[in-house]
Image (cartoon, rainbow, N blue to C red):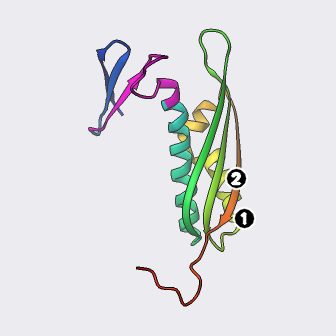
Amino acid sequence: MQAKVKWLDNNTFIGRSGSGHAVVFDGNKDGSIAASPMEMVLMAAGACSSVDVVSILQKARQQVQDCEVELSAERADTVPRVFTKLHLHFVVTGTNLSEKQVERAVQLSADKYCSVSIMLSGSVAVSHSFSVIEAATAPSGSQQQ
């Protein structure tokens, strides 16, 4: 895997992945135009885990309609300001979802599949939780337009 990061101006950079995708990073504290590199790492952990959770639930034939992960992290007070704690809370919405299946999907992502959070867990206290929401259904006899 390869990528490049190029300085644009001030503390703004553009990253280009080997697959041709681009993302803007901003190291400015005030007036930033993009996420910071640490915010990107945080979001990467959430995206990686979410891909796993949704995929595992779909393979288990669960009727997933939405999956959102709420991320929170704590950082060291001194330089380097690395993450010291990271928590991923999954909010999974669907029809007749099995809480056991959601728990299993989150656990498999945490222990086996999510490269980002597993890599971080070598030096960061990573924890996971989840909640399941039953999707609202349209009342019978109603028509969608």
Is 26 above or below relative to 71?
Answer: above
Mostly what secondary structure, the magenta segment? Answer: loop
Vertical comparison of 142 with 7: above or below: below
Residue 59 position in % (x across, y down): 54, 67
Mark 1 surroundings: few (<14), some (14-19) or many (≥20) residues within 10 A:
some
- Residue lying farthest to the top in this orientation: 79
Picture residue at 58% right of the left edge, 33% below the top: 119
Quadrant position of residue 10:
top left
Q: Which amino acid does label 2 sit on?
A: Phe
1 versus 88 height, above or below:
above
Number of the label disc, if any, that sits on residue 130: 2
Name the residue at the bottom extreme.
141
Magenta residues (range): 20-39
Quadrant of the image for the N terminus? top left
Seen from the viewer's position, the closer of residues 84 and 71 is 71
- Vertical arrangement, residue 83 with respect to residue 118, above or below: above
Q: Residue 58 vs residue 74: left or right? A: left
For disc 1, the marked residue is 99
The front one of 112 and 125 is 125
Q: Residue at x 26, y 38 (%)?
A: 20
